[in-house]
């Protein structure tokens, strides 16, 4: 090129061409769960750019879990829904940040009522909470002295089945009738109070006996 390799003297005129640096792109994406982010991307000058950041907004029945540096969500970088990244020492580079949402959860209180048994003879019973596919999520054991328990971590909006293990409630010489305070023991979890009462009514199992009376009138 013209001028390349030429000696610069005190009378030389030197021209410097300054070319702006290309912008880099910061992206904000949802890695998993349901909910939008307020800003999907922004272009910044690598040296002078100031990031606006983005806010993760969970949908109903979902909670914000955090911002992550990787799509697999193994490297958490912020617990705040409103995330503004900090410029690296070497300047901005193309980067993607990931928001993660998880299902909102609530508790379910299960209570046991016994009827028809002598006090102190009530058996300890096992009650399972099952998912929609029939898998057992949790099992609690209730007694007359500890007649209630709380199951945590159930997904809001999801329907679970509360089911007593019949063999654990059986009492010899009694007929057992188990009823639930909700239809078929099925409860859809809400963000409020979730409660189920399981009542065991015991009826004595009487056996009928046919007896024949014989009179002996022989006085001899």
Image (cartoon, rainbow, N blue to C red):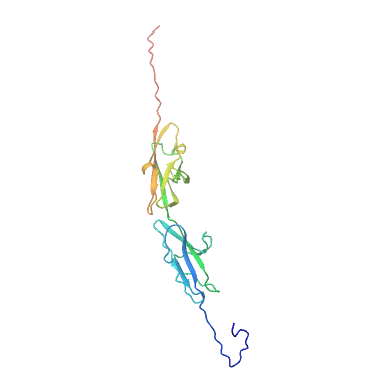
- The percent position of residue 20, horizontal first and vertical second, equals 50, 78
| Residue at position x 44%, y 49% in the image | 151
Residue 111 shows up from this direction = yes
From this view, report whether residue 25 is shown above or below residue 16.
above
- Residue 189 pos. (x, y %): 39, 50
Which residue is most to the top?
220
- Total labels drawn: 0
Where residue 10 sits, quadrant-wise, is: bottom right
Q: Which of these two is toward me, 182 or 143? A: 182
Relative vertical location of residue 173 with respect to residue 134 in this rendering, above or below? above
Instruction: Measuring from the top left, give residue 210's x and y in whole percent.
Output: 39, 20
Picture quadrant of residue 114: top left
The residue lying furthest to the bottom in this view is: 11
Q: Nearer the viewer, residue 4 or 83?
A: 4
Image coordinates of residue 100 in percent, x first then y, are: 47, 60
* Quadrant the C terminus occupies: top left
* Residue 7 vs residue 53, the one in the foreground: 7
Residue at (47, 71) in percent of width and height:
43
Residue lying furthest front: 2
Is residue 83 in view?
no
- On-image quarter of the N terminus: bottom right
Between 58 and 15, the one nearer to me in the picture: 15
In-image side of 113 versus 93 (left or right): left
């Amino acid at each position: 090129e013209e001028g390349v390799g030429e000696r610069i003297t005190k009378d030389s005129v030197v021209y410097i061409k300054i070319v702006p640096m290309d912008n880099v792109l910061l992206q904000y994406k949802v890695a998993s769960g349901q909910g939008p982010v307020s800003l999907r991307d922004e272009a910044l000058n690598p040296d002078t750019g100031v990031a606006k950041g983005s806010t993760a907004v969970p949908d109903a029945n979902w909670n914000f879990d955090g911002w992550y540096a990787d799509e697999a969500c193994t490297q958490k970088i912020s617990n705040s829904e409103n995330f503004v990244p900090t410029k690296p020492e070497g300047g901005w580079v193309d980067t993607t940040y990931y928001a993660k949402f998880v299902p909102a959860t609530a508790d379910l209180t299960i209570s046991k009522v016994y009827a028809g048994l002598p006090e102190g003879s009530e058996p300890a019973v096992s009650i399972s909470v099952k998912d929609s596919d029939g898998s057992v999520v949790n099992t609690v054991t209730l007694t007359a002295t500890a007649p209630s328990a709380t199951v945590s971590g159930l997904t809001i909006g999801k329907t679970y089945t509360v089911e007593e293990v019949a063999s654990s409630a059986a009492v010899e010489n009694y007929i057992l009738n188990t009823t639930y305070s909700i239809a078929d023991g099925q409860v859809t979890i809400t963000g409020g109070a979730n409660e189920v009462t399981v009542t065991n009514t015991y009826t004595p199992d009487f056996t009928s006996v046919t007896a024949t009376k014989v009179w002996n009138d022989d006085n001899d």
